[in-house]
Image (spheres, helix red, strand yellow):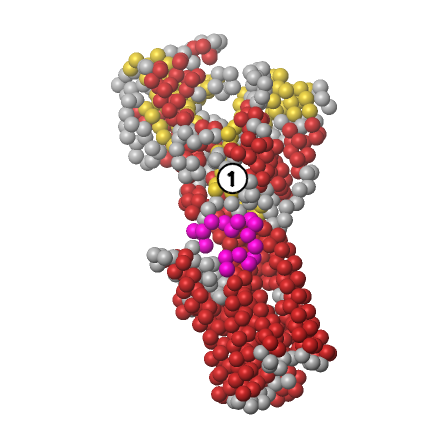
Amino acid sequence: MPGDVVLLEAGNQVPADLRLIEIAQLKVDESALTGESVTVDKHTGVLVGAVHALGDRLNMAFKGTMATHGRGRGLVVATGMATELGKVAGLLEQNIERSTPLQLRLAAFGKRVALAVLAICAVILLVGLLRGEPPLQMVLVAVSLAVAAIPEALPAVVTVLLALGARRMVAVHALIRRLPSVETLGSVTYICSDKTGTLTENRMRAECLFAGDGPAWLPGPALPGPLYAELLRAVALCNDARPAPGGGWQGDPTETALADVAATAGLDKAALDLEWPRLQELPFDADRKRMTTLHRSLQGDVAYTKGAPESVIPLCNAYWRAHGSVSIDQRAWLARADALAAQGLRVLAVARRSYDQLPEAGGEIAVLESDLCLIGLVGLIDPPRPEAAAAVRECMTAGITPVMITGDHPATARAIALRLGIVDNAQAPVLTGADLTALDEETLRARVQRVRIYARVDPAQKIRIVEALQAQGEFVAMTGDGVNDAPALKRADIGVAMGKGGTDVAREAASLVLLDDNFATIVKAVREGRRIYDNIRKFVRYAMTGNSGEIWTIFLAPMLMLPIPLLPIHILWVNLVTDGLPGLALAAEPAEPGIMRRPPRPPDEGLFANGLWQHILGVGLLIGGLCLGVQAWALSMGQAHWQTMVFTVLTLSQMAHVLAIRSETVSLWRLGLGTNKPLLGAVLLTFALQMATIYVPILNPIFKTQPLSIGELALCLAASAVVWAAVEVEKAWRRRSMFPDGAATADAPTS
C-alpha cells in the first residue's frame, strides 16, 4: 500500500515504486524497464528540475527492477497499475492491429481480379449465345473459365511461401511468431533498434588506458611500460570481481571489465590478491563516486582509489611515475577525461597513495582518499558487435533507415551510432526524452525522418516515435528486450524481441524473436522477406498470365470466326496441372540478384506494379494468339486433332513460361535448370501428365483428346517455345534498363 516502508537488499526484486529514504551502496539493475546498460547507483537526495526521464530518477526504485548491491529502505509511492511498470502494461492493452503490406495488396488484388473475371466471362457467354453456340455448353465454358481465371491456388502458395520462409529464418536465428510478418520484413523502411545487446555486445570492455604523458594503450598482451603495469595492478586489486565457475568473471559489469583487461595483459588477479592482501576498504557509494582499498605488500602499504574523474582527480596533488611522482595539472587531466566521455566511454580515474605505517582507525575516508597520486584513466564501453556495422551498411544500401532508440545517455548513444555508421558526424542531433516531451505531434512528425538517435526515452515516447514514422507512410520494425519495449514492439509494423536476454513480456508482444539477439539477423530476415514477396509476385505473374492466355483464347476465337477451341474439361485440367505443383515450386526460387541493393517497395504499391499487368496482358495475348494460330492452321489443313493441339499448346506454353519467369532479369541459361529442382520436377511431371491425356487410350474419351503425330507434337512444342523466347527478350530489355553499364548485379542470384 502507498505509505508502507519496504526494505531492500542485494538480490531482492523491487515490489512497488519506492521513494528511497535510506541507502547503503544500493545499486539497482533497471535494464528491463529503462534500457540502461549498467547498474544504477541510487541516492536519497532531491532531484533538481521538474521533468526527469526514468533513468535519471536516482532517488527512486521501480517495481520489477532488481537490487544488485547494497541495501536500502524506501517509501511506497505507487502500486499495481499506478507504477511505471503498470503504465507499461496499460500501454500493452491498447489493441491496435495493422494489416501487413501483403494483406493489403492481396485484398486489393482479389477485388480487381474478381470483377475483371466476372465481366469477361459475362461477355464471352453473351458473344457465344449471339453466335448460336449451344447455351448449356456456353454456360459451362463461362463457368469453367471463371474457375480457371481466378488463381485459387494463391492462398495455398502464399501460406507455403511464408511457412518455408519462417523455416529458413530459423536457420539464421530468427523465430517467426506471426506468419504474415515473414513478408512484412521485406517492406520495412525503418528499423528502430535498441542499442544494448542488439547493436552492442551487452558487456563492458576496457577500450583504452592512459598513464603518464604517453599515448593511450589499447588493451593487449604486450604492455608499453611500467606505468601501465601499475595501472592494471591497481584496477585488479581495487576490484570485487571474482572468477566465474565456467570461465570469465562475475560481479559488477565495470569491475569484470577491469579484471578482464588486467588478465589480458598477463596479470593473475588471484595471485595479486595473495601477494597484496586487502587490509581495509571503503566501498563505492553514489555520494563519493569512488572506491578505495588498502593493501599490504613487501614494499609497504598502498591504498588504491578508483572512481569518477571529477571525484578522484581533485584529490590528487601529483601523478605517478615509475621513478617518482610529478606535479599534476588537474585541469588537463579532467579535460582528457571529458574528451574520452565525449566519445561515449565510461571513464574511471585510478590513483594511489603509499604508507609507511597504517593510518589509525577513524577518519579513514579523509586520510585514505587525500593527497593521492593519479596513476591514469581507463575508458570503458559496451562495444558494438563486430558484424553490426556491416549490417547497418547493408540496411542503408537496401534503402532502409536504421535508427537507435536507447535508454542510455546521449553521448554514449551518439558514439556507438557513429562507430556503426548510423550517423556520419560527431555533431549528429540526438533527441532525448525531455526533448520529445516538449514536441507536439506535428513537430515530431517533421523531425523523425531526420533524427537517427533517441536517448533516455520512456515507453510512451517510443510509441510516439513509431506512430510519427507510420504517419509519414513508413513501415517500421522496432527491436527491444525489456518490459519497457513491449508497447512499442506491439505498435510497430513488426516487433523484434530478443530471445537470449529479453523478457517474456517483450517476446509475447513481438512478431519476430532474434535467437542470437543480433542486429545482423534482422538484415538477414529482411532479405528473406524480400525473396518471399518476389516469389509471390512470380506466382501471380505465372498464374495470371496463364489465365489470361486461356481467356484470350476463348474470347478471341468467336471474333475470328473460329469454333470454341476448348471444352470445359480442358480448361479445368489446364487449371489443375499448371497452377498446382509448378506454382508451389516457385516457393523454392532463390533470391533475385541485387535484392538488398534496391529500396523497399512503396507501401501503396500493388501486386501489378513495375510492368506486371503489362506482362500478364502481353504474354497472355501471345499465348492466346499461338493457340488460335495453331487452331486456324489445323482447321485449314483439315486436321481432326485441332482441339487436342490447342489444348497441348496451352498447357506446354505455360510450362515454358514458368521456366522463363524464374527471374525478372537473369536468363534461364545463366540460372541453370538445377537451381530450383522442385520446379524442374513439377514441370517434367506436368509434361508427363499432359502426354498421358493424349497418348493413354483410356484417358482419350475422358479428356476428349486424340493422339498426335510426331509432326503435330513438334509444332505444339515449337509454338510453346515461342513464349519462352519472348519472355527472354523481355528480360534482356529489362536488364539493359536496370543495369545500363552491364553491372554484375545481373548475374545469377544466390540462394
State the SS at label 1.
strand
Q: Is residue 703 left or right of residue 713?
A: right
Q: Residue at x 55, y 31 (%)?
A: 443
Q: Residue at x 32, y 18 (%)?
A: 320
Res. 589 visible in picture? yes
Establish if 401 lies above or below 701: above
Which stretch appears magenta? 595-611
* x, y percent for residue 332: 33, 18
Q: Is residue 348 left or right of residue 319?
A: right
Q: Residue at x 62, y 29 (%)?
A: 12
The extreme front residue here reads 130
In the rendered image, the quadrant that contains the N terminus is top right
Tag 1: amino acid:
Ser
Name the foreground residue: 270 vs 262. 262
Within the image, what quadrant is residue 690 found in?
A: bottom right
Residue 2 highlighted magenta (yes or no)? no
Q: Residue at x 55, y 74 (%)?
A: 624
Res. 302 visible in picture? no
Establish if 605 lies above or below 284: below
Within the image, what quadrant is residue 439 found in?
A: top right
Establish if 216 lies above or below 481: above
* x, y percent for residue 497: 57, 43
Name the foreground residue: 225 vs 483. 483
The extreme left residue here reads 323
Name the foreground residue: 137 vs 314. 137
**Residue marked by disc 1:** 193
Most prominent secondary structure in the magenta stretch?
A: loop
Establish if 226 lies above or below 623: above
